[in-house]
């Protein structure tokens, strides 16, 4: 389908595939963003972003202030973690976290003191700061993408060898059903978002800034357009076709530039940030506040659905309570949206930078999935796939653990949007197979790397042992040669002469004894026997004997 | 007639010379099959296969002296890959060999007397320490071969199974829930 271009909007290029979904957005957009009251306890995970988890720099008993760093970035792909309020650290220990595994991870548990004192904010003068130190500050301030992937923002803000990225896209599409946190943020804080975008633009050296918003959010579009008056930032309404909010899809929609396979949007000169990230960046730079809170949608089967400004580390149980609690008949909770989200195992898990929505399920909207039937090769998934992959073939190979083939079919270009599973008439959980295949491949790569390192170390060890053996042999040979040169016994030895004499005497004795040895042992024999032996000898040598034997 | 024979034999001599030179110049020193087999083996260097390390086992397989089912750390997956590489049928793990979950050695540092026997036994230099100093295992480098366990005179080394955490967690193979079918 084609969209008629309007004079002030760029022509949209519809991406392949995609599906129209019931939005359910109105459930949680009835009230403005509400702040959560201060809670007695916060559980702050140290792994809230993609990459290496932050290293804890506080311990039980320490007092912390709001905005104080409690986790230092470790390694390159990592950002800082900060205390959400002032109080005392109760423990640094594994606690349940929002993760599909339901496993525990290292968290800093903070008991709030109720005063909510903050560290002195350090606003940054981004106009004069050089890009590198600005990025370093953002890294320390914990900036990570708030759209859900939580990739450290400072890395994305580094144009690197390209020196500049011409187009910056702010992603306000929010294509997943039910989620409205970006919608409300754009309605209420549009000018702050655009200020954040200006900072991003400055860092990237972008000439053009585009904001893509799905057309099912007219209020957000109006608010953003109003804020953009007087600047050259263009706010563009995009059709509500899932997954328009995918970075590569939105880039294609707005610019017509297609990201190459295994590539990033920066390969075609576009960088995409979520509007929430732009807002957080604005807070970090202009107000000097590290990332300690975000907007979270609580929706679905709860008494008072809505959007909340939530401190990172807030237990999800408390957040649900703030939304009036779950209604009877709730069948589970999803973190994220219904398409890409995952089941929450434990409501003690806290809100992290990645949590944009807590969706409480009920039997009406989320009936249990019907049993999966065999693939009938109808091709519906291939038509729905926005990445132009062959989901049915990927499924086939992933199911048979033929991971090499899945990679050949560009498994890693799959964005796990769930369109294929949604349209599958056989109700096959296709994305689950892709996730399984991806994590198996990653695990194998890890194992392969470990094996290669082990081999290198083993070979080095063998080499070292061989070298040590050789060196020892050489050392011994050298020592022996020295001994030979200086004589068997050294001259310094006072007993040398005596020893040599004893040795010589012994050798002489042995020699004499050897010379004196008789050929026959006949010395001690009686005369008769001697005669007899002599006669035998004579007969043997002489042939016929003269004397007859007795 | 004679010139034709001379031309043909001349060409034959030149080509033969080139081939002979190439055979010497581009000689493959080692059997490339050994490398391929060695790449599949898990490099635990545990010696459970009966050979002193992964490479000797790979060489034995390449020569046809050893069976492909002698490597417990490689498990079923390793056997499958070896079978695929060598074009033979996969078979179950050899008798008396058991595939164990991946684990690492842990030294009880209160008991360690600093004898260095485990350091000498470790095939991948994953244990640090010195004579009469406490030793410790670098868990990232340990392959879980268990070779350090037996030499320890005070039995202070134990094997610990690597626990699943968020960094090594994997998505499970999707299963159809039976309750949905009922």
Image (cartoon, rainbow, N blue to C red):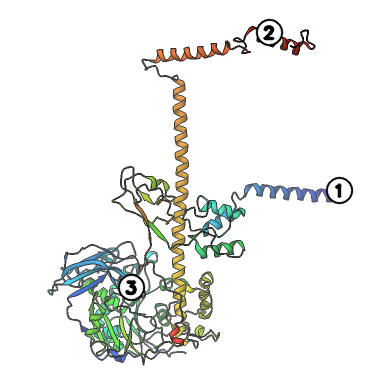
User: Pointer 3: what residue?
Assistant: A150
Asked if residue A259 can be seen in this view, the reply is: no
Task: State the mark number for residue A531.
Answer: 2
**Of callouts 3 and 2, the N-terminal one:** 3
Which is nearer the eye, A36 or A490?
A490
In the picture provided, is B87 more to the left or to the right than B50?
right
Please determine whether, in this image, residue A475 is positioned above or below residue A20. Answer: above
Foreground label between 1 and 3: 3
The picture places residue A214, in percent across and down from the top left corner, at: 36, 87
Asked if residue A540 can be seen in this view, the reply is: yes
The picture places residue A136, in percent across and down from the top left corner, at: 28, 64
Q: Mark 3 lies on which chain?
A: A
Please determine whether, in this image, residue B78 is positioned above or below residue B31. Answer: below
Q: What's the distance in space between the residues labelled 3 and 2, CA to CA?
A: 117 Å
Foreground label between 3 and 2: 2
In the rendered image, the residue lying farthest to the front is: A550
The quadrant in which residue A263 appears is: bottom left
Quarter the C terminus of chain A occupies: top right
* Disc 3 secondary structure class: loop
Task: State the mark number for residue B2.
Answer: 1
In the rendered image, the residue lying farthest to the left is: A115
């Amino acid at each position: 389908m084609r969209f008629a271009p309007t004079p002030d909007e760029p022509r949209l290029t519809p991406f392949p595939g995609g599906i129209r979904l019931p939005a359910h957005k109105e459930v949680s957009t009835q009230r403005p963003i509400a702040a959560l009251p201060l809670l007695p306890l916060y559980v702050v995970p140290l792994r809230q972003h993609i990459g290496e988890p932050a290293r804890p720099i506080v311990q039980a008993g320490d007092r912390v202030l709001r905005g104080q760093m409690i986790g230092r970035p470790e390694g390159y792909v990592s950002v800082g973690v900060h205390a959400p309020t002032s109080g005392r650290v109760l423990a640094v220990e594994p606690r349940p976290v929002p993760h599909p595994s339901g496993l525990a991870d290292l968290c800093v548990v903070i008991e709030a003191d109720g005063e909510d004192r903050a560290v002195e904010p350090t606003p940054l003068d981004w106009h004069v700061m050089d890009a590198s130190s600005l990025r370093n500050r953002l890294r320390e301030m914990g900036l990570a993408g708030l759209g859900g992937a939580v990739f450290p923002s400072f890395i994305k803000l580094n144009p690197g060898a390209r020196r500049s990225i011409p187009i910056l896209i702010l992603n306000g599409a929010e294509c997943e059903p039910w989620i409205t946190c970006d919608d409300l943020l754009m309605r209420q804080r549009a000018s702050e978002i655009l200020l954040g975008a200006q900072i991003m633009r400055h860092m990237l050296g972008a000439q053009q800034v585009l904001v893509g918003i799905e057309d099912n959010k007219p209020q957000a579009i109006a608010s953003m357009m109003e804020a953009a008056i007087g600047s050259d930032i263009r706010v563009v309404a995009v059709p509500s076709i899932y997954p328009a909010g995918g970075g590569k899809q939105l880039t294609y929609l707005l610019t017509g530039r297609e990201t190459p396979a295994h590539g990033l949007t920066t390969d075609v000169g576009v960088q995409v940030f979520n509007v929430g990230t732009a807002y957080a960046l604005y807070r970090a730079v202009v107000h000097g506040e590290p990332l300690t809170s975000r907007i979270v949608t609580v929706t679905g089967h709860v008494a008072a659905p809505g959007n909340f400004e939530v401190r990172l580390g807030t237990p999800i149980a408390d957040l649900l309570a703030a939304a009036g609690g779950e209604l009877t008949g709730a069948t589970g909770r999803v973190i994220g949206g219904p398409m890409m989200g995952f089941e929450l195992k434990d409501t003690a898990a806290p809100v992290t930078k990645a949590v944009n929505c807590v969706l409480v399920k009920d039997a009406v909207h989320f009936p249990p999935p019907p049993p999966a039937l065999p693939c009938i090769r109808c091709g519906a998934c291939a038509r729905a796939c926005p990445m132009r992959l062959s989901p049915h073939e990927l499924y086939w190979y992933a199911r048979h653990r033929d991971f090499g083939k899945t990679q050949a079919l560009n498994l890693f270009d799959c964005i796990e949007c769930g369109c294929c599973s949604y349209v599958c008439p056989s109700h096959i959980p296709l994305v689950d197979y892709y996730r399984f295949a991806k994590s198996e491949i990653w695990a194998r790569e890890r194992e392969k790397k470990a094996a290669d390192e082990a081999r290198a170390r083993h070979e080095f060890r063998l080499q070292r042992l061989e070298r040590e053996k050789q060196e020892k042999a050489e050392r011994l040979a050298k020592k022996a040669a020295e001994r030979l040169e200086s004589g068997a016994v050294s001259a310094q030895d006072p007993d040398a002469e005596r020893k040599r004499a004893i040795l010589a005497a012994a050798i002489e004795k042995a020699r004499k004894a050897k010379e004196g040895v008789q050929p026959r042992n006949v010395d001690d024999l009686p005369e008769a026997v001697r005669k007899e032996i002599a006669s035998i000898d004579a007969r043997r040598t002489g042939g016929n004997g003269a004397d007859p034997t007795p | 007639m004679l010139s034709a024979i001379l031309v043909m034999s001349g060409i034959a001599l030149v080509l033969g010379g080139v081939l002979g030179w190439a055979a010497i110049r581009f000689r493959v020193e080692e059997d490339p099959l050994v490398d391929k087999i060695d790449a599949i083996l898990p490099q635990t260097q545990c010696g459970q296969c009966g050979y002193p390390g992964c490479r000797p086992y790979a060489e034995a397989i390449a020569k046809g002296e050893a069976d492909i089912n002698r490597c417990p750390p490689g498990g079923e997956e390793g056997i499958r890959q070896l079978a695929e590489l060598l074009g033979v049928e996969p078979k179950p793990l050899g008798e008396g060999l058991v595939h164990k979950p991946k684990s690492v050695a842990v030294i009880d540092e209160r008991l360690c007397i600093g004898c260095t026997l485990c350091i000498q036994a470790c095939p991948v230099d994953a244990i640090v320490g010195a004579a009469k100093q406490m030793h410790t295992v670098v868990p990232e480098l340990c392959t879980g071969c268990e070779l350090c366990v037996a030499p320890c005179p005070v039995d202070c080394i134990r094997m610990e199974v690597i626990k699943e955490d968020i960094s090594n967690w994997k998505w499970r193979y999707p299963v159809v829930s039976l309750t949905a079918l009922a």
